């Protein structure tokens, strides 16, 4: 029998990073243990080990929070902190005086506070129950779950990301932003994406101001009022009032970050998000970058060279002087080559060489053209 | 006044090291981590095929190790006990991810690969295909096969680490191998990797 040789990464920097993070967490455990000894706790509902893990996660977060707040310069974005709870475990943590977050069983959530005070929770899996101070003049508070973004207006709500995203609002009001539109969800209401299979009796949502091209029916989002567990009456479908799609740079940045994460496992959703960013951000670097990322995704992963070409042409028309224009020219050649349009690809390559004679792809293209 | 700082050596034997760790000796804990990290890191990486995931899972493993060390009774070797925790952590990770196809960037961050750029690219491509094929197997079969064929464990060790019987471990490895060979019929690069396994 022969072994398949897979050499693990062995860098000391990697080991040191893991070691640093591990011992920071273990130090936090000791703090949590001491706190547990002096602070009366509510009756435990779960097993001891699970609770210990939950405490560990919460305490680790507290330590990171203190560290980042003390060491970070004023106005700078703090390093992200993460809370992970095991199956059966729960964890409560606070973000300053802004929010109390309950991470439910089997949840992984990362949060970060930007220099302007804006707080973003990235829900990777599981569910979080958030009690957030009304925002008013306070900085924004958002929860991102896959391609769904919940922006707090002032409320208590739950966001679940397993298996699909769901938002339940207990008090106040939140804005849910997802591919397909933006919805206001109020106290007592829930929002969930509905797959095409289940949508037969469901009326279409109120059209949003910017229609988004959605390549996959599974990612079509429809707002639905889901009955509460205590009121198992008929499901009522609701088409909440549509509001403007995100336009600020901050929202586009968050959405871009989410799309990048989605690329690996959910390329169609990532593509839909890139389209949404490109449409909603009329100007600015994120729209240009989103179009480039969309084209790359379409050429190399989604095998949709025609779609990529459309994105590139959009980029070239809207952002003729963007720093990404060289990349756009290169992707145009790639898209044409994949489509089998040899002559057009050669023409595009010649255009590239004229515009970027010392570009990163220049040597390669010169060689190709000589052949 | 002369002042000298003498570094106290960490205990070397398993029993002393465990006792010191349980007593909260930070030096001993770091010594245990540094002693066990290379093996745990290698096993975890070979099971998941992703450096990014491996870092998180190694960390999760050691947290579980230090939290549970007080319950370590010495029935097995400390390294086996730690490996069992690592395998359990990875198994839950794989199962929670479901049969998601592997991301193309996962194997791209392999370090220390030797040979020419072409050879490296070929090796990376092969591993991507291997882990993509493994991602389609059940968590049980994938874990057992990776431990056996990639991490080089014996069937008995696989059984011990996955807490199953020898026969069950063998069946899982055999089942995984059968699936991979089936896929390799349409994939020459994968076939090259699994032909003698």
Image (cartoon, rainbow, N blue to C red):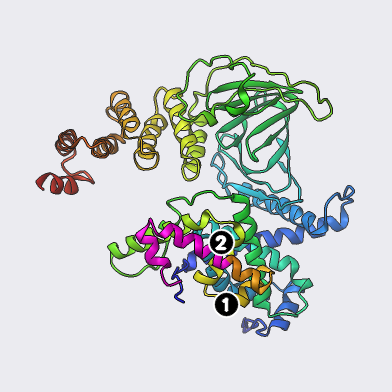
Left-right relation of A346 to A232: left
Label placed on residue B154: 1
Residue under the image location 59 percent in, 65 percent down: B172
Picture coordinates of residue B31 (x, y %)? 62, 76
Q: Nearer the viewer, residue B11 or A309?
A: A309
The image quarter containing residue B95 is: bottom right
Query: Is residue B45 visible to the viewer in this orientation of the structure?
Result: no
Q: Is residue B178 magenta?
A: yes
Query: Is residue A153 visible to the viewer in this orientation of the structure?
Result: yes
The image quarter containing residue B22 is: bottom right
Label placed on residue B142: 2
Q: Are marks 1 and 2 on the same chain?
A: yes
- The chief SS type of the magenta part is helix
Q: Residues within 10 Å of mark 1 (few under 14, many from 20)?
A: few
Vertical relation: B92 (above or below) A131: below
Vertical relation: A313 (above or below) A242: below
SS state under label 2: helix
Mark 1 and mark 2: Cα distance apart in space? 15 Å
Residue under the image location 59 percent in, 75 percent down: B155
Picture coordinates of residue B35 (x, y %)? 59, 76
Range of magenta residues: B173-197
Q: Is residue A247 magenta?
A: no
Chain under label 1? B
Left-right relation of B19 to B47: right
Residue under the image location 24 percent in, 35 percent down: A336
Check contact, mark 1 vs mark 2: CB within 8 A: no
The tally of labels here is 2
Chain under label 2? B
């Amino acid at each position: 029998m022969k072994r398949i040789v897979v050499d693990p990464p062995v860098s000391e920097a990697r080991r040191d990073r893991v070691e640093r993070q591990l011992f920071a967490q273990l130090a936090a455990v000791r703090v949590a243990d001491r706190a547990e000894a002096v602070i009366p706790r509510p009756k435990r509902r779960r097993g001891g080990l699970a609770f210990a893990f939950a405490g560990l996660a919460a305490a680790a977060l507290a330590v990171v929070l203190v560290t980042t707040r003390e060491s970070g310069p004023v106005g700078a974005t703090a390093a992200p902190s993460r809370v992970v709870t095991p199956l059966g475990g729960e964890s409560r943590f606070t973000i300053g005086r802004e929010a109390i977050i309950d991470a439910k069983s089997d949840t992984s959530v990362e949060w970060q506070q930007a220099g302007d005070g804006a707080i973003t929770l990235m829900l990777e899996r599981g569910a979080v129950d958030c009690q957030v101070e009304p925002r008013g003049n306070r900085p924004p508070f958002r929860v991102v779950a896959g391609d769904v973004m919940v922006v707090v207006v002032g409320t208590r709500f739950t966001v679940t990301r397993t298996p699909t995203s769901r938002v339940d609002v207990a008090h106040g009001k939140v804005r849910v932003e997802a591919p397909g539109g933006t919805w206001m969800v109020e106290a007592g209401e829930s929002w969930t994406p509905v797959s095409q299979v289940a949508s037969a009796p469901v009326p279409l949502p109120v059209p949003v101001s910017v229609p988004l091209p959605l390549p996959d029916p599974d990612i079509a989002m429809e707002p639905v009022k889901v009955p509460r567990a205590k009121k198992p009456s008929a499901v009522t479908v609701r088409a909440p009032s549509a509001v403007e799609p995100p336009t600020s740079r901050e929202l586009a940045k968050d959405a871009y970050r989410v799309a990048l994460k989605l690329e690996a496992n959910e390329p169609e959703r990532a593509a839909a998000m890139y389209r949404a960013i490109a449409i909603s951000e009329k100007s600015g670097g994120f729209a240009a970058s989103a179009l480039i990322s969309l084209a790359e995704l379409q050429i190399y992963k989604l095998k949709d060279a025609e779609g990529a070409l459309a994105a590139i042409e959009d980029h070239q028309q809207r952002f003729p002087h963007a720093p990404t224009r060289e990349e756009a020219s290169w992707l145009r050649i790639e898209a044409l080559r994949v489509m089998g349009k040899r002559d057009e690809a050669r023409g595009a390559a010649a255009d590239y060489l004229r515009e970027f004679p010392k570009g990163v792809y220049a040597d390669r293209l010169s060689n190709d053209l000589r052949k | 006044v002369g002042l000298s700082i003498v570094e106290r050596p960490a205990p070397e034997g398993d029993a002393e090291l465990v006792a010191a760790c349980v007593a909260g000796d930070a030096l001993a804990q770091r010594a245990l981590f540094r002693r066990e990290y290379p093996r745990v890191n290698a096993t975890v990486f070979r099971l998941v095929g992703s450096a990014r995931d491996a870092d998180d899972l190694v960390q999760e493993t050691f947290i579980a190790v230090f939290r549970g060390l007080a319950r370590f009774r010495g029935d097995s070797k400390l390294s086996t006990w730690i490996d069992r925790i690592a395998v359990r952590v990875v198994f839950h990770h794989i199962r929670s991810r479901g049969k998601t196809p592997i991301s193309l960037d996962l194997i791209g961050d392999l370090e220390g690969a030797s040979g020419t750029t072409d050879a490296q690219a070929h090796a990376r491509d092969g591993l991507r295909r291997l882990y993509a094929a493994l991602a389609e197997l059940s968590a049980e079969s994938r874990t057992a096969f990776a431990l056996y064929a990639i991490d080089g464990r014996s069937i008995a060790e696989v059984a011990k680490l996955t807490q199953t019987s020898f026969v069950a471990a063998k069946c899982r490895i055999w089942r995984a191998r059968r699936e991979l060979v089936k896929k390799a019929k349409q994939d020459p690069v994968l076939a090259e990797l699994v032909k003698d396994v």
